[in-house]
Image (tube, rainbow, N blue to C red):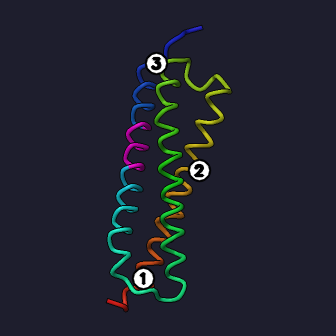
Amino acid sequence: MEKFLSEEKRDSIKLLFDAFKHLTTLSSGSIVLLAAFLKNIPNTGCAKYFAIGAVLFLLVSVLLSVAVLFLIPKVLAEDGLRDERVKNPFMYSAVFSAAFFIFGIISLAIFIINNLGSF
């Protein structure tokens, strides 16, 4: 059994690392921008709940993305995702991080659309 990953698999894992690095950056940036502009936007009905939802979804996305970023070197050091102790947390973190990012961006978009008329 070959101990190390092939060059193609290693490159694909590095691309995955970059994707989650960008996901972390986008989520963190969205949280910072939302926090910066939130004080200038009046409280209009349920828009506040979409803002809170966006922050929470994006925060969970950041945390799960960081978990993926910590697990990727373990994947590279071992024989890919054959070890179930690495595979399950890696897959769950990756899928839920992407899902929470999408929910966060949708909540942020709804919040922005609700507040377009209040400027």
- Residue 62 horizontal/vertical position (percent): 47, 50
Numbered tag placed on residue 6 in the rendering: 3
Among the 4 quarters of the image, the one containing residue 20 = top left
Residue kind at label 2, given as amino acid type: Phe
Cα separation, mark 2 vs mark 3, equals 27 Å
Magenta segment range? 16-24
Q: CA distance from mark 1 to mark 3?
A: 47 Å
Residue 36 colored in magenta in the image: no
Report how far apart the C-alphas of labels 1 and 2 lie in the structure.
25 Å
Which residue corresponds to the image point at 54% horizontal and 64% vertical from the top-left?
103
Residue at 50% of width from left, 82% of height from top? 47
Q: Crowding at label 1, few (<14), some or many (≥20) Cα neighbours within 10 Å?
A: few
Mark 2 vs 3, N-terminal side:
3
Identify the residue shown where x is 38% and y is 62%: 30
In the rendered structure, are the residues bearing label 1 and label 2 in contact, judged by CB atoms less than 8 Å apart? no
User: In the image, what residue type sits under mark 1?
Assistant: Ile
Image quarter hosting the N terminus: top right
Q: Residue furthest top?
A: 1
The secondary element bearing badge 2 is classed as helix
Residue 96's disc is: 2
Return the residue at label 1: 113
